[in-house]
Image (tube, coloured by chain):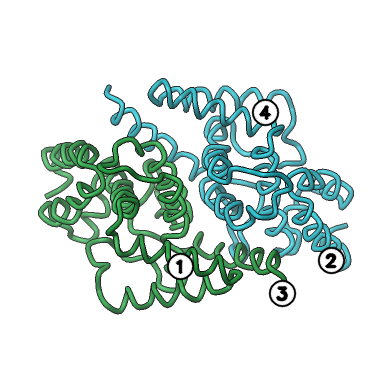
Chain colours: A green, B cyan
Amino acid sequence: MDNIEKILSFIVEVEKLKNVHRQTKPVGLERFENSAEHSWHVCLTALMLKDYANDEIDINRVIKMLLIHDLGEIDAGDTIVYKSETHDVKAQETAGINRILSTLPGEMSKEFLELWYEFENGETADARFAKAIDRVTPLLHNIHGGGHSWKTHGITKEQVFSVNQRIEKGSKELWSVMRNKLEDAVNAGILE
Amino acid sequence: MDNIEKILSFIVEVEKLKNVHRQTKPVGLERFENSAEHSWHVCLTALMLKDYANDEIDINRVIKMLLIHDLGEIDAGDTIVYKSETHDVKAQETAGINRILSTLPGEMSKEFLELWYEFENGETADARFAKAIDRVTPLLHNIHGGGHSWKTHGITKEQVFSVNQRIEKGSKELWSVMRNKLEDAVNAGILE
């Protein structure tokens, strides 16, 4: 198969991300979000908030990371952030991203796999900012949606503050604003 | 409202794009695509096919264009490409994008509105490539989905070839491959 055909097959394969359901509902909607529309949303969020990163970042690399960050879920499914660090889930996602990216032409496959690992490891400035952004949108869904996902999964305010404090590693200013919103959510009784 | 709060309000507002339904179904799914997941899909498609652009392009600008290209549909709704050039629809989309982007801080509002107009006008190399990519994914949906949208809307092969030939303005190689796939669709009887 020539390279353009390989890429078009990849483009059809990744459609499956539109059928991977997440744990929160978009603001105003009664259905759960899927990982494809989530990926768009975090790319746009990163682009608009880029000036609030703690360190100098390359927003174009951040967006590329976020475009591919959830592709491993096509095989592994989505897991709520409060439970996602188990060995089995990580192994499934890693196998998934390897399978999917391996269908691309060789050089591209290597480039995007490296970018995915960089995101997962979360150590570079770009990855820290991308990971911070990835945590913000589900918080907004809960804050504007009566804490629906927190309630369904029995997530406590201690868990929410502790897990999402990592936003600070990417953007202190953003965490400061989000922390205030979470405190408002506690005061409103939607986060206990 | 300070800038970070303005941006977070924008991020919540654009969630509405997840509820704008398009005219084709993602490959393998029984439901229609929404414009948010479509936006992710075309960004990823552009990124993977960037080396096939006719002219030198800035893929980062192309991706930014594609991240915002459909935001006007939040107010205007989606219109099938074969009917989208009416004055009324364009006026609604233009009013919509102006309303939505005007909620961003001033400089950002101006920057992204200019980018949106550049995409709409389709004259620069970046915009020509972005517009070419935007046409490819609905073709793949029809090709891999029994021509469902062509049939529903009574779209003829003459219309499909004539409207989509514009892909050539962004990428001759991509149009050549897609034209072959469309000819296969005609031979298979799913495009008449």
Tell me: B158 left or right of B120: right
Query: Do marks 4 and 3 share a chain?
Result: no
The first of marks 1 and 3 along the sequence is 3
- Residue A62: where, in percent of width, then height? 40, 50
Residue marked by disc 1: A113
- Quarter holding the C terminus of chain B is bottom right
What type is the residue that disc 4 sits on?
Answer: Val
**Label 4 with label 3: CB-CB less than 8 Å:** no
Disc 3: host chain: A
What type is the residue that disc 1 sits on?
Answer: Leu
**Image quadrant where residue A8 sits:** bottom right
> Which residue occupies the foreground of this view, B34 or A104?
A104
Residue marked by disc 4: B89
Residue marked by disc 2: B184
**Image quadrant where residue B12 sits:** top left
Query: Do marks 1 and 2 share a chain?
Result: no
Tell me: B4 left or right of A6: left
Disc 4: host chain: B
Residue marked by disc 3: A1
What type is the residue that disc 2 sits on?
Answer: Asp
Q: CA distance from mark 4 to mark 2?
A: 33 Å
Label 1 crowding class (10 Å Cα cut-off): few <14, some 14-19, many 20+?
many
**Image quadrant where residue A13 sits:** bottom right
Query: Do marks 4 and 2 share a chain?
Result: yes
Q: Residue at x 84, y 66 (%)?
A: B184
- Residue B22: where, in percent of width, then height? 62, 46
